[in-house]
Image (tube, grey):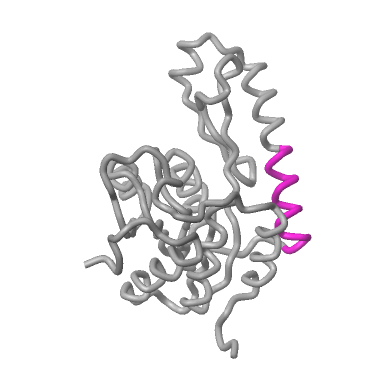
Amino acid sequence: MPVKSRLPFEDRSEAGRLLAQELLRHDLPANVIVLALPRGGVPVGLEIAKALGASLDVVIVGKLGVPSQPELAMGAVASDSFRMLDEKLIAELGISREEVDTLIAEETAELVRREKLYRGGRPKLDLQGRTAVLVDDGLATGSTMRVAARYVRSLRPAKTLIAVPVGSVHACRLLRKEADGCVCLATPQPFHAVGEWYIDFQQVTDEEVRLFLEQGYRGFANRA
């Protein structure tokens, strides 16, 4: 039984604490790393990192929008030149390779800027052989988390686990195929947007992300 199915959550911090209680049942190893999707996933991830005695880092994914319909994704990029492209959609819409390459370059530059801002010069945490817990504040379509999961798996962790407080049934089912496990506290129906399941869903600022990561980067193991 999940820790909590009653909704809405008070805020992201409460959701993170409740999600952490569920994760503590999974007997995770001591070398676990929590990876949050900014910005909304970071306060959730911070509470989980505290509860697990783990380090906190981010995985930043940039959407590649169709030039004429920016809200329609034709792919995505992540760190280390990782990319996923919907080649079928690109061909159907007649988008040129030059347009695709330009969008990739622009989104990659923005991704690099955000990583520098959030980490403040700290290197990315090494995932090889460790257990990675990927966290966000919720899943609507799951498309961004899917890219994040595939990128993280390319870094060769021993195990990848996706964890969210709330998500659509479709997204949670989809993401079980992208990781070794997917923990979702609640899957309410109908599901329109993540924010409807929180009382306080104020936007998380870049400065808050930076401060949360500064707290969680070195981990919470053995802290008073």
The residue that appears at 65% across and 29% down in the rendered structure is 104
Locate residue 201 relative to residue 197 in the image: left or right.
Answer: right
Residue positioned most to the top: 94
Q: How many marks?
A: 0
202 vs 163, nearest the viewer: 202
Residue positioned most to the left: 1
Residue positioned most to the bottom: 224
Locate residue 171 relative to residue 74 in the image: left or right.
Answer: left
Residue 154's place in the image compared with 25, above or below, is above
State the image coordinates of residue 203 (x, y, percent, origin top left): 60, 49
Whether residue 117 appears in magenta in the rendering, the answer is yes
Residue positioned most to the right: 121
State the image coordinates of residue 165 (x, y, percent, origin top left): 39, 58
Residue 181: in sight, yes or no? no
Residue 3: in sight, yes or no? yes
Whether residue 108 appears in magenta in the rendering, the answer is no
Task: Please tell me in which quadrant of the rendered image residue 14 appears.
Answer: bottom left
State the image coordinates of residue 129 (x, y, percent, origin top left): 49, 67
- Main SS type for the magenta part? helix
> From the image, which quarter does the C terminus lie in?
bottom right
Locate residue 191 relative to residue 211 in the image: left or right.
Answer: left
State the image coordinates of residue 147 (x, y, percent, origin top left): 48, 42
The residue that appears at 50% across and 24% down in the rendered structure is 72
Q: Magenta part of the protein: which range? A: 109-122
176 vs 171, nearest the viewer: 171
> From the image, which quarter does the N terminus lie in?
bottom left
The residue that appears at 50% across and 47% down in the rendered structure is 148
Locate residue 163 relative to residue 54 in the image: left or right.
Answer: left
